[in-house]
Amino acid sequence: MKDCKKLLMEDIEQIYLGNLSTVEADIALPSKGKNGTVFSWSSSDERRLSVDGKVYRPPFTGGNREVVLTLTATLGDVTQTRQYTANILEMEYPFELIKAYDIEIFAEKGTQPDLPLNIIAVNNLGEDVMMPVKWDSADSTACGADRYVVKGYLQNNVTVNATITVTDDKNLLNPCIDREKVIEKYEIKDVRLLQSSGFYAQQQRVLEHFLNADCDSYLYNFRTAAGLDTKGAKQMTGWDAPECNLKGHTTGHFLSGMALCFAATGNKQIKEKLDYMVQELGECQDKMASQPDKFGEGFLSAYDESQFDLLEVYTVYPKIWAPYYTLHKIMAGLRDCYLYAENTQALDILKKIGMWVYNRLSRLPKAQRDKMWAMYIAGEFGGINEVLADLYLITKDERYLSASRYFDNDKLYLQMKMGIDALGNIHANQHIPQIIGVLKQFEATKEKHRWDIADNFWNFVTSDHIYSIGGVGETEMFRPKKQIAKYISEKTAESCASYNMLKLTGMLYQYYGSAEYMHYYENTVTNHILASGDISSASGLSTYFMPASPGGCKHFDKEENSCCHGTGYESHFKYGEYIYAKDKDSVIVNLFIPSRLDNGKDVIELDAKAEENSFDVVIKADKLSAKELKVRKPLWAEKALITVDNMPYTPVEENGYYVFDITKGNIILSFECRPYIKSCIDDADTASVCWGPYVLAAISESKEFISISQKDIAELQHKGNLLFALGDMIFKPLNAISSEHYHLYIKVQ
């Protein structure tokens, strides 16, 4: 009689699960062996592979996923475990490709042309999409011609041509343009919010949260990684738990949030906490530097370098989780501590990390980096290209600019350079920060293609991808252009995507000076960012998604420490960033957020209040260093009654602004407000109800769309305190809703 262990091992050896390297269908998981061994199974990711063998493949562009199945085999009193790794393949592209867009590339003589890994194609629905391509050999040195064509191959037998022009003309290889900023923004420290608004109240709630926060908890994972004592601190949870591969990212956001908080409020306790954090992170970096066998020179993170090693051999998420994304948050936090809180040690630490990035990536060929950055989640790098470009602008060390360019991502940049919107099914917030980095690089280099990338991206997104509140994305993904009503769900409008779109918008506004950018900015900051914060307590929490489906409800996950929780630390201290601005002739009022500007040269106080049928803005200009004052003319007001020092005044209108020829005075703008709707770009009958700058939501738990006629919408009554009624139905601004179920969209009859 064989012993139990031998019988059990025989049963284990008989298990065959198929080809686990390319899993596309369900796996038959046995429950019992022929010798009577009982099998039980567990999965490292039941969202993709359940314990009964059911396979859920990631969507197209979602990337393949590795899932570890653990077998526990039991026979009598003998137990044995074994692990099996299954590679779950992403779904095939669900549509038929019809054609691809040919491309043109300029290559310097004696070099190989830089052919992209992905190309723009058109599917049978007429949608532009990014698809992988394989190219014929493209050896320009062997060709000997100044102009030649290389053929590429996509699925469905679709081909594409790349025309290569070989030249030494720098203007063709990398043209530059002379575009300078026309707008100067005021520093956040020169603007203080007044107590008469929800913006101030939310800022104060997050300030209170920061004052109560334990800095040592945010340092826990860094100290552990460096081998330092954690000082009895409590471990963090969720995405920052010690077992999570993204740990450290919230600490970076916390640094940025405190730096912005100090600038926006001047709170000295916040400055003390910030300085303590920077000092302790410096100690962690020094400790890591003393262990050259484990850490490269200058490295600082909440874990070791293993995730960076694995990324370079194309390891997929969730085995690794965006190591350069996490590093970006840490670097951005340190940069903000330097810029907003004048902590010079933060810059010293940051420069060392930046040099670590340069040394690591400079040894990799571009093709390898291209493949890394095109990977779903694993290759996400946030806006690290922006921070590195900032480091160059601060230090003038060319190595930081080179490191910034190492993050160029052709999968995103190609479509923008060609002026084609193929954003559908691309992860939204993985890519918006990259565009911010591109625009910061343009500031440093004046390279035309970088301007085109950023400019086209903003226009595409704000024209064809936004919800009524300014938010973008559904389940984190851009959907095909002009498809909003089709994607109204519980998981619309990721908060950190709006955080980054606002950052990009403000940067472009500085080059254009057009009110168009501030129209978008006002809508998004009022109806998404302010609405994303928890208004019930000083929890410091934010929504991840902003539900848009009927009967939706905001959710605040207390222990998650998500990306949106992190940007929420920052957003509420950035309200003062673009309220006021300045051009060569004017001081400008962009946003009607109650506040006071005082930088010594310009002193303005602004208050705003919603009356029954008007939105009234009072501007007291005590001192202006410019010869005129401009006030943005909002899109939501049909007309305005305007007085200066209690006398009727008719200002000139210019580029979306009212222009007042004054250097001092009291201005009152009473904007007439009526109910109006914002219809979805793909369905005029699906719309949000609005009043003044506010997107309103109907309070209702119904899961069916509410239908309202155009005539009834016109009868919407403002009952005061931003409470609106339509018969028995109550509407409130989305930013005033806490736990109620609501309808952000209604059906217009």
Image: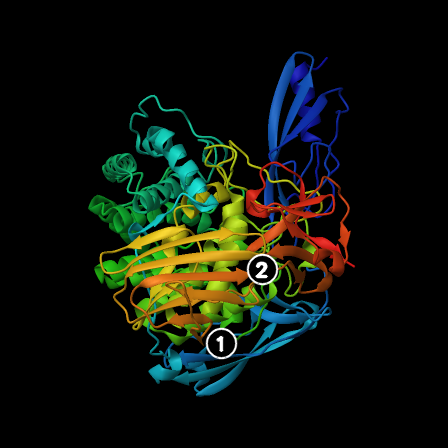
Closer to viewer: mark 2 or mark 1: 2
Indicate the position of residue 53 as horizontal and vertical percent values.
72, 36
* Numbered mark located on residue 138 in the image: 1
Q: Tell me what residue is drawn at x 60 percent, y 76 percent.
A: 101
* Numbered mark located on residue 68 in the image: none
Q: Residues within 10 Å of mark 2 (few under 14, many from 20)?
A: many
Q: Tell me what residue is drawn at x 56 percent, y 57 percent.
A: 692
Q: Is residue 373 visible?
A: no
Q: Tell me what residue is drawn at x 49 percent, y 58 percent.
A: 522
Q: Is residue 385 above or below residue 657?
A: above
Q: Secondary structure at mark 1?
A: loop
Query: 538 or 15: nearer the eye?
Result: 538
Indicate the position of residue 339 as horizontal and vertical percent values.
27, 51
Q: Secondary structure at mark 2?
A: loop
Residue type of the residue flagged with mark 1: Ala
Assign the N terminus to one quadrant of the image: top right
Q: CA distance from mark 2 to mark 1?
A: 62 Å
Q: Is residue 669 left or right of residue 628?
A: right
Instruction: List the residue tagged with mark 2.
Output: 673
Indicate the position of residue 560 as horizontal and vertical percent values.
52, 35
Along the polypeptide, which appears first: circle 2 or circle 1? 1
Q: Is residue 600 above or below residue 147?
A: above
